Image (spheres, rainbow, N blue to C red):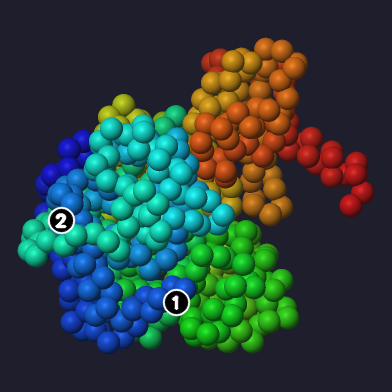
Amino acid sequence: MKLAHCTPWPEVDAARYRAQGHWTGQSFAELLTEITQRHGERTAVVAGDTRWSYRQFEAQTLRLARGFAAIGIEAGERVVVQLPNRAEFLAVIFGLWRFGALPVFALPAHRRLEISYFCHHTEAAAYITTDLHAGFDYRQLAHEVRAEAPSLRHVLIAGEPGSFTALSALPQVGALPLPPDAGEVAFLQLSGGSTGTPKLIPRTHDDYLYSVRESARICGLTPETVFLCVLPAAHNFALSSPGLLGVLYAGGTVVLSESAAPEQVFPLIARERVTMTAVVPPLVPVWLAAAASRRTELATLRLLQVGGARFDDTLARRVEPELGARLQQVFGMAEGLVNYTRLDDPPDLVAQTQGRPISLDDEIRIVDDEDQAVPEGEVGHLLTRGPYTIRGYYKADAHNARAFTTEGFYRTGDRVRRLPSGHLVVEGRTKDQINRGGEKVSAEEMEHLLMAHSNVVDAALVAMPDVHLGERSCAFVIRRDAQLRAAALLQFVRAQGVAAFKVPDRIEFVDELPKTAVGKVDKKLLRQRITEQLVGLSTAIPS
Ligand code: AMP
Ligand code: DBH
């Protein structure tokens, strides 16, 4: 691991993962060369009007790699990538990987505060984004980011560049540096986080590709697989479980969609003969409702993966009868560990559990508050360590001391129980986060943004139940004077430049925040309070 501020696996463990064949020494660049040799004329990527064979895809990545090298981006340098679900996303990341530059994965929803932070924190050399997407002009964002990020030497735009440089117009160098070593960090992935600032996750070629290969095997991928990507491509689920990378590894076809709405997605499934896709739980009822009248469009769909947040078992049982596709639950995390229900699991396990780990070498501990194992079958905190789970976040020493045990186990912040079969059931969480239908909001990050307002004395963000998203966020706020209105406070939060999904769904002004015996804000009580209030509302107002 050459990238500074990363915690490598101890050499004994690394040696074992290599000896077992988990870490093969192949980098992403070498993988692409190999799959292109094997599947050259098959279709690799379909997005909008773009349709690339593996050979064309490889040529695109090489052209970009030569361009990046020509403008002076070097191996080991960080490049913030914020692209919608278009073919360029894949060409850019493989282009960077070709000579060992490191993508830093941002989401299209991120705004000035987040992108500037990623650029700053990673001392990024470049920021690659798009022109327009979902009604938003990313070039405007790029202007703001560039003014705040002194390390940025380049802003590159996929599409109409405005005053920046177009990805399609990069100069070309002849010779490229050699591909990186597979033991090095390949990219920085984003964590949903539970702290004041987002945490970045250093993943190596070796560790990530192990999870990708095994995921492809578990999900039965073949060159005939046609995978539809409707979640943001950079999301760890869509990228690697088995996602875009797993499908490319298997020689299948990746179809990228910028929309997840049935009106756009169902015709695309029919046209491209899509066989599998991955969604977050809130999309399922929407697709089930649409399938009632347009199921014929889903005739080729064989596997629906659902993950990112807890999926309700009643909905789970409707998937196969109503969509005609088998369900697979996926419980994963960008830090590493991924669990799948297996294709041959009995229906009850598929409906009621979040699956079991990828690897026999995924070590699982389920413990109480003192880190002691709970009796088998009981609920406890999930700790994990293994061949593709990080040992530390990037540049986050103080947080790492809390997020990992001294033995290197990652404290997932999830509460789970384990069945005799090894399957895990997610029962809740201890991390201070709101899981808004798969989109994670760190309470502390939003509390800081609320408290930056001169009229706010204190703020606490908690989850409140929601029929569509599972959870939404509610901010309890103590204000200095009653002139401050919720709408103005929300406007203040937005104006700081954050992803819309993080902006509180509700504000409750209060005179004080309840405290626990040790003097911390009692969030359990706040969650209870807002839940009761919402139940009261729904019974008081006839629907
Ligand atoms: P992150 O660490 O930001 O990648 O988010 C991963 C977290 O998402 C996990 O630790 C869980 O809290 C949550 N999560 C992911 N998949 C599931 C699932 N299938 N059921 C419940 N929670 C999930
Ligand atoms: O929520 C996640 O982060 C997630 C869900 C499913 C994930 O990272 C994954 C699969 O790999």
Mark 1 — residue? 49
How much space separates mark 1 and mark 2, taking CA atoms?
28 Å
Residue 126 horizontal side relative to residue 493, left or right: left
| Residue 354 in picture, x, y percent from top left | 50, 60
- Residue type of the residue flagged with mark 2: Ala
Q: Element type at marker 2? A: helix
Q: Residue at x 54, y 68 (%)?
A: 350
- Please state if 484 lies on the left or on the right of 462 as rendered: right
User: Which mark is first along the chain, 2 or 1?
Assistant: 1
Residue 408: where, in percent of width, then height?
A: 26, 40
Query: Looking at the rendering, which quadrant does residue 519 occupy?
Result: top right
Q: Nearer the viewer, residue 12 or 225?
A: 225
In the image, 234 versus 490, the foreground residue is: 490
Q: Position of residue 127 (x, y in %)?
A: 32, 47
Q: Residue at x 89, y 52 (%)?
A: 543
Q: Relative to 188, is 455 on the left or the right?
A: right
Q: Which residue is mark 2?
A: 70
Look at label 1 and name its amino acid.
Asp
